[in-house]
Amino acid sequence: MTGNARKFEAMAGNAAAEGQVIGYVCKYTPIEIFAGFGMGHSFMLPNENSFDYADSRMWPSMCGYAKSVMQHVHGGGYESVVFTDCCDALKRVSDLMRADCGKPAVDRASGAATPAFVIGLPRVICEESIRAYAQNLMTFIREYEVHSGMAFDVRRFADACAKTTAPEALSAAAPVGAGYVALLGARAPKSLTERASALCALPVRDLTCASHERSFADSESGDLALDERLIRYAGRLLAQTPCMRMSDNGARAALSGDPNIKAIIYHTIQFCDFYGFEYAGLGTKKIPSLKIETDYSPSSSGQLETRLQAFFESNGLLAEKVQEDKNVKNNNYSLSAGDEPIPRASDTYGARDADNARDTDGARDTDSTKGADSARDSYYAGIDCGSTSTNAVIVDAGGTIVASVTVPTGANGADAARRAMDEAAGGIGGAEMIAWTVATGYGRASVPFAADDVTEITCHARGVHELFRGLPNEARTVIDIGGQDSKVIRIGADAGVAEFSMNDKCAAGTGRFLELMAATLGMELGEMASAGLHPKERVDISSMCAVFAESEVISLIAGGKARDDIVWGVNLAIAGRVASMAARLGARPPYVMTGGVAKNAGVVKALELKLTEQSGGAKAEVTVPKDPQICGALGAAHIAREKGKR
Amino acid sequence: MSAVDFFGKTVERNFRRRPRFTRGFLRIGYAAQQRLLRRRRGDRRLPSQAFLEQATMRAMRRALADPSRCALVNMFAPAELLHAMGLRPLCAEGFSSFLSGGKCERGYLDFASEKGVPETYCSYHRALLGAVHSGLLQKPRFIITSSSVCDANTSTFREAASHYGMEKFYIDVPHEESEEAVAYVRTQLERLVAFLEEGMGRRMDQDALRLAALRTNESVRYQRKFIDELARREFPNYISAEMHRIIVGHNLLGTEDALKFFRMQYEDIMEFPVQGGGTGLNVDGGIRDGLHVDGGGDDSGFNQRFPDSDPRAKRIIWCHVLPYYAVPLKKLFDFSDRYRLLISDLNFDQLTELDESDILGSMARRLIRNHFNGSALRRAESVTDMAKRLEADAAIIFCQWGCKHSNGGAFLLRDALVAAGVNTLVIDGDAVDRRGTNDGQLATRMQAFLEMLDGGR
C-alpha cells in the first residue's frame, strides 16, 4: 500500500465520504481522478423548469445549459462541482459558485455553498498542451486533497482507468454497421434525446459534446510515477473527438461522415454559439438534417415534438409505433370529467373502416342512390388547429375545394376544431359525408375526431404544391408566418418537404410579434396591414426580441416618428428574421407565402425587399394565394384524400 | 441625408454584388474621414485625442489597402511581433467598430446570419465574418488569434481561415498564471515567430522587435503616468476616444504612433489643474500632497478651454466596450463637465512592460495576466482597485450583446464595485449593431442613474 493510499484509508469517512458525488459538465473532466478520492461522479444534464436563481445571478442572455447548471447545483446534492474552463458561460458559472463559497446559505439543502473547482483545459492538442493539462490535473489533485482532507489514492485512480475500457456512452448506441440517426452538436436536453428516440424508426445515437469516448485500459499498466501516469492520462482525455471549443477540430468530420448515418439532428443551445458554425458547414452534405435550437428548458417540448415528427415524416423515418398510435388515436381518445360527450371519431368524421377503403375513387358523387358509404367516401377534410385560428377545408375526391371555414381557436382547440368542422361540413350535407380527416397545426393532437395527424410543415408544403402544381410559378419555397411561429419550407423535386427551418422559442418573426406591435401602436391588425406601404423614413427595430422591440416602438412614438414609418420598420424586422432563415436554408424562388400574416401586404413587401437584397439584387417575388391561411388545412385535406383512397 | 447616412446606404446597396467597389468606397471614405479628423480651430478635442483618431483611422486604412501585409487578428494578438515583421494588424473589434461608425454594419451583420453565424453571436465578430463572407475583406497574409479572452476568437478566426482556405495561428492562453503556463505560451510564441518567418520568407529583425518592445514599455509607462494624473486631475473625455484608445493600446502597441499618442495624452493631462482628492501617486509611486506640483500644469489653459468646468463632476469608470454611436450616451458624457468619463477597463487591462531580455516570455506573461483572462473575479478586483484609485463615484457595466465572457460576470463585477462603495449600473446593448440598442431605454436608464448620483451629492 502506498503512503497516499494509507493516508486515504485513515481518512475514510471524512468530509468526502463514499457515496458522495462530484458533478461535472465536460467530457474532458478527469472523473477517474475523482475515483482516486473515493468519490462518485455525475455528468450534469439538468432538467430545470425554472431559472429563477440563475437569472438572479447571471445576465439573461447566457447559454441555457449554463443557467440550468447554476440552478441545478443551487438545489444541492453535490459534494462539489468540477469545471473545466471549457466555455465562457460555464467559466462564469464557476466564478459565481466560487464567489458564493464566501457567502452563507447558498445551497438550499445543506445551507452551504457547493465548492467549485476549475481545471484549465487546453484548446490545442500537442505535446506541450498534454503536459500542461497533466500539470493542471496535478494542481487539482493537490487542491482537492486540501479541500477534502484526504490523500489521493493512485491505486484507485489506476483501477478506475483500467475499468474504462470501452467508450462510455451516455445514450443508446447503434449496433456497428447499422443505419442510425446521429444527434450532433451541443449537449441535448433529455426531452430531445427521449423524444427523438421514441419517434424515430432508427436508433438515435448521441454524438453531441456530451458524448464520452474514454478508454485508458492499455495506458495505465505498470508502476508509473504519478507525473508520468497523469501525462498519459491527459493525452488519452484530450484524444477524444474534439468539441467545437477546441481550436483544431478537423477530427469532427468523422462524426457526420459515417456512411451509416441516415439523418442528422443537430442541436444547438441558444446563446451557445460554437455549434451554429458547424451546422452551417453541414449544408453541403447530402444527409437530411434538422437543426433544433433549445434554451435547455423542458418548456419547448411541444415545438420539439412537431419538428421531430415532421422531420422523420418527411424522410420516411417515423417510427411505425408512432404511426400506428396516430392511426388508432381516434378510437382511444378520452373525455375529461365535465366535458360534453364527443361522439367517437369513427362515428362522425371519417375514421373509416377497412371494408370501405377501396370504394373511394372517382369524382364527387351526389347520387343518393349509391348509398351512404359511397357518398361519405367522396369527401376528405383537413383541419389546421393553430394557435390563433382554426381552419377546416373539405375537398372532394378530385381534390377540388368544396368548403373552407376559419374560426378563432380561443382557449379550447378541440372545441374550435369541432366548430370549424361542423360549419364546413354543413355545406356538403353533414359530417357523415367525410371519409377521412387529417388534423394539423399545434393543436393537431387534440382533435379527437381526426383519423390521423400530420405536422403543419408537411401540410403547408402539400397545400401549396396542390395550389401551384404545373403553373409557371410552381412553388419551390413556402414561407409560413403563423401566429406562434414561422417556417421556411423548401419543396423537393418530389413535392415533399426537402428541408425546413422553424423559428425558435421567441415571438420575434411571428404573427404574435405583429399583434404586439399593433397593440403598442394602437392599431387594428387590418389597419397595420395597409399602413407602412409608403414609408418616408427607414427606422430600425430590433429583430431579436419582441419584448425589446415593443419598448423600441414606444421610444419611436415618443421620438415623434411617423406611424407609417414605424410600421414599415416592424415589417422589415419580421421580414429580416424570416429572410435570414430562408437564406440559411438555401431557399430558392418561386416563393409562396402562407399563413394569416400573408394577408399583410406590408410584410409581404418587406419580405420581397429582404429576399431581393439577399439574392444580390435579383428581384424576388412572393406570391400569396387567395386564402393563404387555409393552406395547411388544404394540405391536410389532400393528405386525407390520399390516405382515404388507399 | 447626412454624409454618414449616405456612406452607409451606399455600402448597404452595393456590398453584396460589388465587393470591390464597396472596398474602394470604404477606403475613400476612411481617407476623407481621416482628413476631417485633423484638429481644427475651436476643436474641443485635445491634441492627443485628435491624433488618436487619425492614427487609428490610418492604421485601419493601411491594413485594408494591402492584404499582402495584413494580419487578421484579435485584440490580444501580440502586436509587437507583427509590427516587427512589417505587418499591419486588422483587428476584429476595431474593424467592426469602423463599419459601425460609417453606419455600414447592418448589411454585414445580416449577411453573416445568412451564412449561418448565430444571431446570438457577438456583433463585433458577426460583422467581421459578414465582411469576410461577402468579399469585402480580401484574403490576408496571416490569421492570428489568441484564445483569450473570449470564445468568439476560436470560432471567428477558424471560420475566416476556412473561408480563405488558409492556416491560422492560434495561441492557447491558460486561465491562471504559473511559471509552467508562461513557458507553455512562450513556446507557442516561438512557433508564431517561426510561422511568421516562414510566411514572409525572411527572418524576424530582432532589432525591430527590440525597438517595438522599447516603444511598448515607454507607452505603458506613459499610460501609468496618465492614470496617476487622472486620479487627481480633470480630463475631458468622450465616448469614441475611449474606443479608439482600445485599438492603440492593443493592436498598435509597439508602433511610433502608439508611443506618440500615449506621450501626448500624458502631456495633455498635465495641462489640467490638480483637483482636490485622488490618491496622487506620482510617476515614481510616491504620494503627492494633492497640490499642483508639475510644471506642465497650467490652470489658465484649462479654464480657457473649459470655462464651465465643474470641479465636482461625477467621475465614472466604464466597464467593457462602448456604444459610441449612441446619441444619449454622447449627450451625457462627451466633454461633459458634470459626468466625467474616466476610463474603460479595456484601457488598463494589460499595463505590463516587456522584458527586453525575454520579450516572448514577457509577452506570454502579459497575455495570461490580462485582467480579462481567467476568472471574472480577477477582473472585478482590478476594476475595483482602479475605481478606488481614481476615486470614481460610479461605474457603468455595459453588457455587449453576445458577449458571454463579460456578461456572465457582470453581476460579480457589480457586487465587487458596490461593496467598494462605487455606485454601479449594469446596462445592455450592442456597441456595433444600432438595432440592438434602444436609445429611449438607454437614455432613461442612464439618466435615472445619473439623477441618482446627483441626488447623492
Image (tube, grey):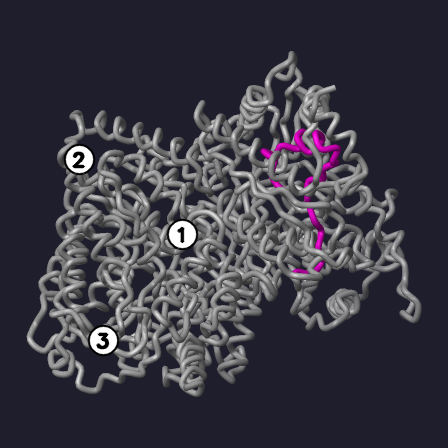
| Region in magenta | A25-51
Instruction: Using a 10 Å C-alpha cutoff, classify the residue at mark 2 as few (fewer than 14 neighbours), some (14 to 19) or many (20 or more).
Output: many
Quarter of the image that includes the N terminus of chain A: top right
Q: Which mark is residue B291?
A: 3
Q: Earlier in the sequence, mark 3 or mark 2?
A: 2
In the picture of the structure, the residue carrying the numbered disc 1 is B371
Instruction: Using a 10 Å C-alpha cutoff, classify the residue at mark 3 as few (fewer than 14 neighbours), some (14 to 19) or many (20 or more).
Output: few
Q: Amino acid at mark 2?
A: Met
Q: Amino acid at mark 1?
A: His
Q: Position of residue A134 (x, y in %)?
A: 53, 28
Q: Amino acid at mark 3?
A: Leu
Q: Position of residue B210 (x, y in %)?
A: 17, 37
Q: Position of residue A456 (x, y in %)?
A: 64, 54
Q: CA distance from mark 1 to mark 2?
A: 28 Å
Same chain shared by disc 1 and disc 3? yes
Q: Secondary structure at mark 1?
A: loop
In the picture of the structure, the residue carrying the numbered disc 2 is B85
Asked if marks 1 and 3 touch (Cβ < 8 Å), the reply is no
Q: Position of residue A37 (x, y in %)?
A: 71, 33
Q: CA distance from mark 3 to mark 2?
A: 45 Å
